[in-house]
Image (cartoon, rainbow, N blue to C red):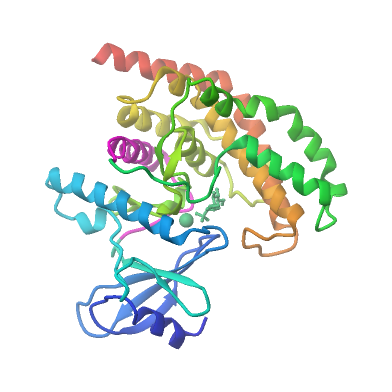
Amino acid sequence: MEEKKLQQIVSHFKTKGEAKEVQPLGNGLINDTYKVTIAGENTPRYVLQRINNTVFKDVELLQKNIEQVTHHLRKKLEEKGVDDIDRRVLSFLKSETGKTYWREADETYWRMMLFIPDAYTFETVNEKYSHAAGLAFGEFQAALVDLPAQLGETIPNFHNMEVKYNQLRETMKTDPAKRLSSVLPMVNEIETHVEEMCKAERLFREGKLPKRICHCDTKVNNMMFDAEGNILCVVDLDTVMPSFVFSDYGDFLRSAANLTAEDDADLSHVGFNMNIFKAFTKGYLTSAGSFLTSIEIENLPYAAALFPFMQCVRFLNDYLCGDVYWKIKYPEHNLDRARNQFQLFKSVCEHAEEMSHFIEECTANKEKAS
Ligand code: GN1
Ligand code: MG
């Protein structure tokens, strides 16, 4: 989009000065993100984002959720006496309407937040960073356990495996992009695991599994680190909503413990890195251990398998729909992503026992220590 136009959009927000420069930032697959530089010296920088309102249909609800979450997190940081709060939680700007978003005449929606300087995101992480990420996501969930407000689902049934599978079945009925025949063997293989992967919804119906406020997009690049490798904050809060804790645990491992990128078409590169699993799990159980139930804990290996499986179904569905959801770089991109995720799922399953043993050891050590 033209820079002039973007500058005009910025002018509707309460920034400290006029936008001098608006340049693309990051590589999210859903929203479009820009960095905004303000004229003058020592002025704050900002992030401008176009909210994808095809994906997030209720922008009012979306921003209300985010405001509630960021206020709550900010309050907790203040109580703890943390001094660099603006680096530890996102701060959204109000627009001239008093809301934290702006609607353009062309029905596009925009929001702005403070840019956090000297912060880094990564597409891959080592064990040290994974341990820090485990601690951070566990802390994030723990900090929101007492959120007074009820949050809405910004994408209804976002991580509901039953619903995601039914969506795939529905797409298959009409085969809108005429791509089904080429993926039938894969669909057949997926089907042999569906029942086992819909366990979370069954446990929920039986009243055995709670929903908690989760981040729901704990992809490794949704975390900001400082120059020393300490976690500053968790970003990309669009999907913060009630879900099973499996969402945050499983989605981090899906992205961080894969030996390659989620769209690597060479399946021989795909595999599950148990060292990343161990580091992350240790961190997560340390900070989330206080509120997790035994059913949640014993199903963490299931969560590690569920997320590549669900992502495979989601990518495949988008491929069959004709690539309407994720940005793609070439025609088979979503298919390559789906195959990659299915391969990862199989690799995770091979480590099921080892994962369970490790988790048992961690929890036993914790009991001994307390
Ligand atoms: C999307 O927005 P981004 O790129 O962080 C998606 C996640 C997927 C991920 C796969 C709202 O995340 O659920 O796991 O792509 N977010 C939404 O790369 O669908
Ligand atoms: Mg992101």
Q: Is residue 5 left or right of residue 336?
A: left
Q: From the viewer's perspective, is 160 left or right of 111?
A: right
Point 57% across, 62% down: residue: 54
Return the x and y of residue 79 as percentages of the image width and height: 13, 44
Where residue 33 appears, as percent x and y from the top left, is 45, 68
Residue 202 sits above or below residue 337 on the image:
above
Residue 131 located within the stretch drawn in magenta: yes
Query: Toward which corner of the image does residue 188 lie, by quadrant?
Result: top right
- The reply, left or right, for residue 29 in relation to residue 337 is left
Percent coordinates x, y for residue 144 in the rendering: 31, 39
Query: Is residue 121 visible in this depiction of the protein?
Result: yes
Q: Is residue 295 above or below residue 118?
A: above
User: In the rendered image of this protein, does residue 78 appear above or below residue 128?
Assistant: below
Region in magenta: 119-147
Residue 128: quarter of image: top left
Res 265 visible: no
Residue placed furthest toward the right? 181
Most foreground residue, 96 or 279? 96
Frontmost residue, 278 versus 96: 96
